Amino acid sequence: MNFSNITWLDDRGHIKPPLFLYLILVFLARGWCIFIASLTQFNDRSGLVRLFYPEKSDFILALITGVGAVLIYGLIIAERKRSWPILMPLFRYSGWLLWGLLIVDGLFLFQRMVHDDYLFKISYSIDALFLFWSVIYVFKSKRLYYYFADWTADDTAVKVETSSDDEIK
């Protein structure tokens, strides 16, 4: 049998994280991305932040949402290495945390629109569109569902056994 057409799996037979999951996490952590980019400007460090977030409270709320996205990214790294089995229960609930972050980001988008008295801005429409597609993806994606269910205790036990066998040799 030829399984070369299965692109979901890596070398060890585990499901790879979907690319769109990484894009969703960058979207949710955009406040942190803007903050890091603003650190590179020497003259006016807050100028870039004010460009994207005129209200300081909106920027703080974006940073709060971004903390959850960074946490999920850390859990993805732990899952790929499969070295910390203590994080396995947290990883299983990452899908629910992702849902919560998308809902909170939708509420923050609504609050930003309220701050601007419901005036149309292209950034709000792009955020709303990407949020809409992210919700549909998280709701309908079988690959994402299987990915969050892929890390089991059996995988960790196999890795521990093979690493102890390598040490004996």
Image (cartoon, rainbow, N blue to C red):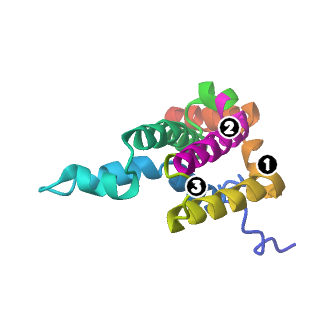
- CA gap between label 3 and label 2 equals 24 Å
Q: Is residue 92 magenta?
A: yes
Q: Nearer the viewer, residue 51 or 133?
A: 51
The circle on residue 145 is 1
Type of the residue with mark 3: Tyr
User: Tag 3's secondary structure?
Assistant: loop
Type of the residue with mark 1: Tyr
Q: Nearer the viewer, residue 151 or 63?
A: 63
Alpha-carbon neighbours of circle 3 within 10 Å: few (<14), some, or many (≥20)? Answer: few
Q: Which residues are magenta?
A: 90-114
The circle on residue 118 is 3
Please tell me which residue is depicted at 59% across the width and 35% down the height of the picture: 165
- Disc 2 vs disc 1: Cβ atoms closer than 8 Å? no
Q: Is residue 54 left or right of residue 46?
A: right
User: Tag 1's secondary structure?
Assistant: helix
Mark earlier in primary sequence (2, 1): 2
Please tell me which residue is depicted at 63% across the width and 55% down the height of the picture: 21
Furthest-top residue in this view? 86
Mark earlier in primary sequence (3, 2): 2
Figure check: 18 above or below 114 = below
**Residue 92: x and y, percent?**
72, 35
**Residue 142: x and y, percent?**
83, 56
The residue tagged 2 is: 100
Q: Is residue 142 magenta?
A: no
Magenta stretch secondary structure, dominant: helix
Q: Is residue 73 left or right of residue 37?
A: right
**Residue 12: x and y, percent?**
67, 54
